[in-house]
Amino acid sequence: MQPDVRNFCIIAHIDHGKSTLADRLLEETRTLDQRKMTTQVLDNMDLEKERGITIKMHPITMQYTYTDGKAYTLNLIDTPGHVDFTYEVSRSLKACEGAVLVVDATQGIEAQTLSNLYLALEADLEILPVLNKVDLAVARPDEIAMQVGELLGVEPESVLRVSGKTGLGVPELLRAIVERIPAPRGKSTEPLRALIFDSQYDTYRGAIAHVRVVDGKVRPGQKIIFAATQKQFEVQEVGVLRMAQIQRQELVAGDVGYVVSGCRDVKDIRVGDTIFDFENVSSIPLAGYREVKPMVFAGIYPADNADYELLRDSLGKLSLNDSALIYDPETSVALGFGFRVGFLGLLHFEVIQERLEREYNLDLVCTVPSVEYRAMLTDQSVLLVDNPVQMPAAGELEYMEEPYVRSSIITPEEYIGSIMQLCIEARGTYINTEYLDGTRVNLHYEIPLAEIIFDFYDRLKSISRGYASFDYEILDYRRSELTRLDILVNGEVVDALSVIVHKDKAYDWGRRVCDRLVDLIPRQMFEVAIQAAVGSRVIARSTVRAMRKNVLAKCYGGDITRKRKLLEKQKAGKKRMKAVGNVEIPQEAFLAILKAGE
């Protein structure tokens, strides 16, 4: 046991100021030189700074001197707040003994506040409640402290009040971390057991594991073995994580740091695996993590087929850094070779797409996202369908099931009517209304996952003027009237534009997609028909008008039959061109279908 070590993470709803508070903790402990301080200093991806959100967990080690002069090592993990990155939060909790629960003093408890709190309680962590943004004129610290006190069953006076912007209350927070969060319980004398909670790929040093040492010690030159893969390596370097990797002689029980083992194959290091000493293997591996199940699937293809190998390698390196990413190769008639990739949500999809384009310089084409359905076949077998192309023929299909989620929407009561209408449009089933206080309610609905992965969250924010918060958890699969909607361009089915929709929404979806594609597909020398079809039945159609040469321009007089002859000749030529013509579909067309539900 190390009495002078504290391992903790910061959890909160999105935009409640976790990363800004982490900046003040780094300043107060002088972990980073003042000249190098920037806003959201732990968010080291450009994408995180641009969007103002945390995407990846960020571990960092701080040295803090307590009031009695004793030095403490504080291992902090800053976590994401968005529902799509809940898996990152659950992984960080395994490496800690305590969690700082941050609540915005202007907005109060919101959906992900509750979700992340329950994760921390399940992990049996000590909760340290903190009110942030108390310096703002619209802050309601007394009222929000009462809410937090009721939620946790503690006195409102024990809820700390800080400002991540000004640094108010940060010294008191550091003292509370030392006093209220327990020290690690592992023993350095036991055989080595270290939990891999994250990893990254370095071009020169291979896969680097971020570990929490639970028992024993790990040092350079030591032979180790990974419990899941049974691969053996010799440790080359160990150290702690600050803004850079700081090398150390050893890591002992209770420490959080990194291990360089010379592992070159990204498949050999798995997040949640246990590292053992090869000479003294412990019989009990650590619990690790529950296997994450992606809920949104999309096809990702290189715009240039020559980049297929680069895309495969890039996905491999990203999956090492993001264990929620799952991918399999697939082919498309329209787009060539690519991958079917699984994501936790639509934001996760957008982030992975942008990271592939920025970090690996890839030009990508992505198909419309879909969820995983269950097809019950006539022979009583079950087929999992995450791609419309996989949907069985009508003669083989008994019925379809789609995933449902239990959603929690916390909103001011004046928006209840509009939000209920939104949920009804999304085929939601009302469960109950829970009144949190005099002004806010928690609405519970059961909604098909397919209805919320597109623009549900954006519409919710628009309706509530930004005040409503949203969280969901997967429930089960339920029988539903689903159908495959195909888009035909010039009579040919474009498989990359196919989608599985509810029968009641097939016409509206097809109508919108056809109208959008008319504006995006360039005009040809012949008329191009864009059709939406369910099976063999066309339910919507739009037409891209042909570019027309004026063949009558040279006819300044003469018999009308000569003009008719020229027009008939032009008509026959266009018919022949349409039969053999090839219509190029621009990349924007695949992106436009994402907005078809708006």
Image (tube, helix red, strand yellow):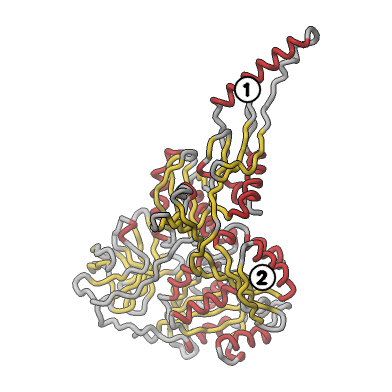
The one nearer the camera, 44 or 439, is 439
* Front position among marks 1 and 2: 1
Per the image, label 2 sits on a secondary structure element best described as loop
The one nearer the camera, 328 or 74, is 328
Residue 102 position by quadrant = bottom right
Residue 436 position by quadrant = bottom right
The CA span between labels 1 and 2 is: 55 Å
- Residue 497: x percent and y percent? 54, 44
Per the image, label 1 sits on a secondary structure element best described as helix
- Residue 249: x percent and y percent? 30, 72
Residue furthest toward the right?
557
Relative to 61, say whether 367 is above or below: above
Question: Residue at 53% across / 46% down in the picture?
Answer: 498
Question: Residue at 51% across / 44% down in the picture?
Answer: 496
The image quadrant where one finds the C terminus is bottom right
Question: Residue at 45% across / 56% down in the picture?
Answer: 375
Q: How many numbered tags mark residues here?
A: 2
- Is 228 on the left or on the right of 381, as rendered? left
The residue indicated by pointer 2 is: 468
- Residue 465: x percent and y percent? 72, 66
The one nearer the camera, 359 or 226, is 226
The residue indicated by pointer 1 is: 574
Would you say residue 318 is visible in this rendering?
A: no
The image quadrant where one finds the N terminus is bottom left
Of the residues under marks 1 and 2, which one precedes in the sequence? Answer: 2
